[in-house]
Image (cartoon, rainbow, N blue to C red):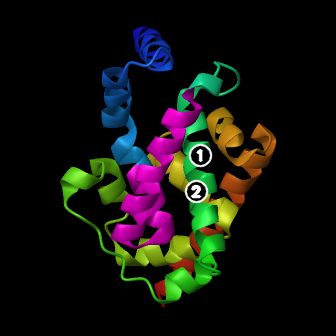
Amino acid sequence: MPEKRELSKLIRQVQKGDLDAFGKLYDRYYNPVYAFVLHQVAAVADAEDITAGVFLEALEKINGFSWRGAGFEAWLFSIARHDVLDHFRRRGRNRESAINDRHMDIPAAKHVETTAEAAWDRQTLRDAIWQLSDDQQQVLLLKLMVNFSNGQIAAVLSKSEGAVKALQHRALINLRKILEGNDD
């Protein structure tokens, strides 16, 4: 539990106005948040803008954060999820239109975690995941890229753990069908 204690200490410091402590949180969570956002909006510039907004919003709302539910990571990714949805609403576009005109730029490894880059390395896999429902995509992104527990995913998506398990199960079945269809 030293990790949770260290995180709790950082959050308390930020809540007291310590911007250096917030910088440590930013350094720790920037890459996974950026990867999560990038793989939904598919454009580097949009992902960078949204990710910056996520951290600005987190800084503004940090005093309202408390250790209920799934924890700080789920709270931060919940902000990211809502900011991605707002991005599509503001543009009057949906995720499908982003898929059709995306130019899926994968930036240098220094911008995304190695696990995210490896998971999205194959174009076929990316295209298959984009064919899943929004909720199924987000469950897989949070589970495979960020290594969230079902409880944390449930908190981010505002669903029950049972619903997350069902979404994950259906997502994997649908992904398998899509990938098997691509092998023809």
Q: Nearer the viewer, residue 108 or 66?
A: 66
State the SS at label 1.
helix
Judge from the rendering whether residue 73 lies leftward or rightward of residue 152; answer left or right.
left
Q: Residue at x 34, y 46 (%)?
A: 31
Q: Residues within 10 Å of mark 2 (few under 14, many from 20)?
A: some
Q: Which mark is residue 79?
A: 1
| Residue pointed to by mark 2 | 83
38 within the magenta span: yes
| Residue 180 in view, yes or no | yes
In magenta stretch: residue 102: no
Q: Main secondary structure of the magenta part?
A: helix
Query: In the image, residue 105 lies at what x, y percent?
Result: 30, 74
How far apart in space, not on screen, are marks 1 and 2 (Cα)?
A: 6 Å
The residue range painted magenta reads 34-62
Residue 168, horizontal then vertical, whole percent: 66, 53
> Residue 52 has which mark?
none
In this orientation, which residue lies closer to the viewer: 139 or 9?
9
Q: Position of residue 18 (x, y in %)?
A: 38, 18
Q: Are marks 1 and 2 in contact (CB under 8 Å)?
A: yes
At label 2, the amino acid type is Asp
Name the image quarter holding residue 161.
top right
> Would residue 115 appear left or right of 41 to someone viewing this image?
left
* Amino acid type indicated by mark 1: Ile
